[in-house]
Amino acid sequence: MKFKHILMIILVIAVIIVVIQNSEETSLRILFWKITMSKIIFYPLLFIVGFLVGVFSKSGSSNKIDKDKVGVIREY
């Protein structure tokens, strides 16, 4: 297994442990709304939203260099 996969598995296990330990209810106020839900639902939801934001922000960026703007480097 690659180091990246092992690190991801450890991170997921840590998230699962934190979610299980926080099973009481919490209130969330967003402007005029008050939402009461269990932390066991809230934390994974927050984790998934954060993950999706990271995936979509990564997919929008490009590492390619525009050769018209930079110019072409000649090799000798």
Image: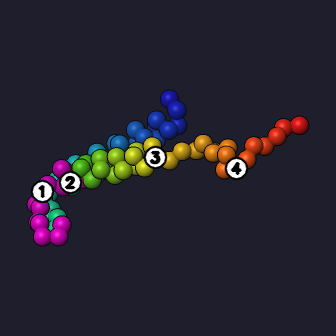
User: Cα distance, mark 3 to mark 1?
Assistant: 33 Å
2 and 1 marks in contact (CB < 8 Å)? yes
Disc marking residue 70: 4
Queried whether the magenta region covers residue 37, the answer comes back as: yes
What's the amino acid at mark 3? Gly
38 falls in the magenta region: yes
Distance from label 2 to label 1 (Cα)? 7 Å
Q: CA distance from mark 3 to mark 2?
A: 27 Å
Distance (Cα) linking label 4 and label 2: 46 Å
Residue extending farthest to the right is 76
Q: Which residue is mark 3?
A: 60
Query: Contact (CB < 8 A) between labels 4 and 2?
Result: no
Residue contact between numbered discs 4 and 1, judged by CB atoms under 8 Å: no
Among the two numbered marks 3 and 2 on one chain, the one whose residue lies closer to the N terminus: 2
Outermost residue toward the front in this view: 68
Real-space Cα distance between discs 4 and 3? 21 Å
**Does 42 sit left or right of 59 as displayed?**
left
Q: Residues within 10 Å of mark 1 (few under 14, many from 20)?
A: some
Q: Residues within 10 Å of mark 4 (few under 14, many from 20)?
A: few
Q: In which quadrant is the C terminus drawn? A: top right
Question: In this figure, which residue is indicated by the disc labeled 2?
Answer: 42
The residue range painted magenta reads 30-43
Report the residue marked by disc 1.
Answer: 37
